Image: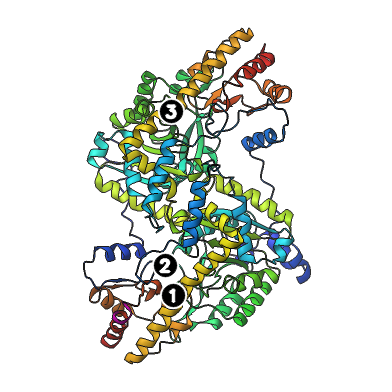
Amino acid sequence: MALLQPARLLLSAAAQRHRRLAPAAARASSWWSHVEMGPPDPILGVTEAFKRDTNAKKMNLGVGAYRDNNGKPYVLNSVRKAEAQIAAKKLDKEYLPIAGLAEFNKASAELALGDTNEVIKNGRYVTVQTISGTGSLRVGASFLQRFFKYSRDVYLPKPSWGNHTPIFRDAGMQLHAYRYYDPKTCGFDFAGALDDISKIPEQSVILFHACAHNPTGVDPRPEQWKELAAVVKKRNLFAFFDMAYQGFASGDINRDSWAVCHFIEQGINVVLSQSYAKNMGLYGERVGAFSVICKDVDEAKRVESQLKILIRPMYSNPPINGARIASTILTSPDLRKEWLEEVKGMADRIIDMRNQLVANLKKEGSSHNWQHIIDQIGMFCYTGLKPEQVERLTKEFSIYMTKDGRISVAGVTSGNVGYLAHAVHQVSK
Amino acid sequence: MAAGSVFASVPRAPPVAVFQLTADFREDADPRKVNLGVGAYRTDEGQPWVLPVVKKVEQKIANDASLNHEYLPILGLPEFRANASRIALGEDSRAIKENRVGGVQCLGGTGALRIGAEFLRRWYNGTNNTATPVYISSPSWENHNSVFVNAGFKDIRAYRYWDAAKRGLDLEGLLEDMESAPEFSIFILHACAHNPTGTDPTLEQWRHIAAVMKRRFLFPFFDSAYQGFASGCLDRDAWALRYFVSEGFELFCAQSFSKNFGLYNERVGNLSVVGKDADNVQRVLSQMEKIVRAIWSNPPSQGARIVATTLTCPQLFAEWKDNVKTMADRVLLMRSELRARLQALGTPGTWNHITEQIGMFSFTGLNPKQVEYMIKEKHIYLMASGRINMCGLTTKNLDYVASSIHEAVTKFQ
């Protein structure tokens, strides 16, 4: 750009206008006159509307948080016990290191990969504590923007969690998509995914949901994961795993992290985001981790030092409360056992609701194939309902969900599953 | 990718100096060692201090069976945001009454600075104007620079602040830099207890600064990390910020509750936004939500709950102010004791700056050679800039520190 009139370059049109105004008028105008109102959040909008509804039978199926069979938030017993143990220790409130609570980081990596994993044994990884899953993705995206010199391109499954796009974009990456969900089957478009992925430019970044895909609930089967790993390896793609539901999907932590472990076994050094919002119910405590599988310990140390350089100007160091709870649970045999049972309990209730919903739909006399509701996994379910049907569900039955037909199965209880089935049948028969 | 690695060329980054200092201190086996580095409060026994009111409130929270761990809204806990802004702007703030103040709960003061910086880069002085100059005091907290660089600003400049020769504020240099700054530049101002110098403008000097900033259309971004901690009085420490608001400025103020609540590791901060009117503030907050959503989605609840509970209960609020005064008073005592000893020893130089400076830190004026002597020979850890954390001083180590400074100053010039 020309060096002419450099002062003018600094003055936007708004600023020039601001300056031209007489002092009194300039004082009266605002710096923010041109700031647009941000668009309302689609999911929050659902909850807002739900709150305003006075129908006693109303259901909020937009909520992305677990609810018990009474529709109430669930604080895990293992969490309560851990909190009591921590309180008794009367610890101080000194700053955590930039990378967070060391015991938490170690336990988190071991939870994801298994403590006998060669990566753990060789120490060829770094894990930093992050602000839940979002914070982990942002730190990861920023790290790739700065140090992954091969590509700016990140490929997300279509569809993906809505927030993936702004996170990667704000971090300076470019977003693309690969086929994933097949609306015809309400299942995995395996052929489409393989086809798209095999054409992704080499050394691009590709993001996978480790388990319980959000928003569809559609996960690849192990044989399919194997083929995905093979093509990722063949195309020399950089694999970024987002694991927000370990344990919460199938009820088994090892089963849910199988894909991540398989990729690593195949020699693919992945990066991994973990969240403890759902599987420990620690939503508002913001507990997460970001891991980089490295070539060796030296690389891990170098990578860690750079992750710290990224974190420091974001928020300096992470919050302790949730990480201490998670760490206490993961490293105390009794609490860990209890936690695993509670996670399985949550997963089982979700699976039970899926089964009951389908059974009730059959009872209603629905002739549609609702098998996908049972085949999908995790908190969310892509029902296959169209926007017009969703609108009817909301207007006629006070059942709230997002326009894409996604429901949070967590919002279903044995008390309202019959009503839900009835309503769905009414709008889809 | 088999043999090499995508991260083969990632260089080892240098550690953050202040944390390396504490790491070195920990490794040191010398029984005389003193840590005058990182900025956290210590009792006279040299221990961290969990405020009694915080212990009380945490107990209350733990016993409240109605509380759970659900997500906070994106902008944070409403009672926290409103009360945090109220603490900064005052009980009788007209701006609050006029509904033109908004708060964004953030991860500590750093988080508040970062969200504010990200917003300014996107929406201030046009849209996505990364060329707007950002002025940071010379010296300043070293992370200020990184925050604004990482938010995307391309032109970070220093404004004169510390006069090493007279060990005080270089007001003339500061004002000159403001006069010559391009209009609409952003200025990072320390609300009180300037870090690292401990040197604040007087009330009169603040008035002068505000007048120049108004005439030059400069944007004030206050960093308030020590409200209450500096003088012991919340209102007094917020005087500059409130003066600017009363002068009609639109501004940002990044507030930290790390020090004044001792909640360092809970990451409690608030970005207060003061605008011309409610409509502008609403639109600004809606855009803040988008920025927050892509960095941390929503903030941590524990620390905000503690602060909100304390600020909304008159008894707890009074207790908190008392705890804050306890900390501030101990720091003031250490300042006067250190100065007295240096003067009694006849240590070369003038030492009144020790008591004239305010807050946690003091720019002693020690040069790098003298600092090295202090660390290596005397096992007294301070920053290379000569900055000391007064909280690291105790009645037990005052004599040792004073005599060590005396040695350093007489041995090296």
Question: Which residue shows up at 57% across the image and 81% down it?
Answer: B202
Dot 2 alpha-carbon crowd within 10 angstroms: few under 14, some 14 to 19, many 20 or more = many
Q: Are marks 3 and 1 in contact (CB under 8 Å)?
A: no
Q: Position of residue A144 (x, y in %)?
A: 41, 44
Q: Is residue A363 above or below residue A11?
A: above
C-alpha separation, residue under disc 1 versus residue under disc 2: 10 Å
The first of marks 1 and 2 along the sequence is: 2
Q: Which residue, as the protein is rendered here, is positioned at the far left?
A: B29
Dot 3 alpha-carbon crowd within 10 angstroms: few under 14, some 14 to 19, many 20 or more = many
Question: Looking at numbered disc 1 in the image, what kind of residue is underneath it?
Answer: Arg
Which chain's residue wears label 1? B
* Residue A355 forms part of the magenta stretch: no
Question: Looking at numbered disc 2 in the image, what kind of residue is underneath it?
Answer: Tyr
Q: Which residue is mark 3?
A: A211
Q: Judge from the rendering whether residue A239 lies leftward or rightward of residue B279; answer left or right.
A: left
Q: Which residue is mark 2?
A: B41
Q: Find numbered disc 1 in the image and state the secondary structure of the residue it sits on.
A: helix
Q: Find numbered disc 2 in the image and state the secondary structure of the residue it sits on.
A: loop
Which chain's residue wears label 2? B
Which segment did they paint magenta?
B396-400
Question: Looking at numbered disc 3 in the image, what kind of residue is underneath it?
Answer: Cys
Q: Which mark is residue B330?
A: 1
C-alpha separation, residue under disc 3 versus residue under disc 1: 54 Å
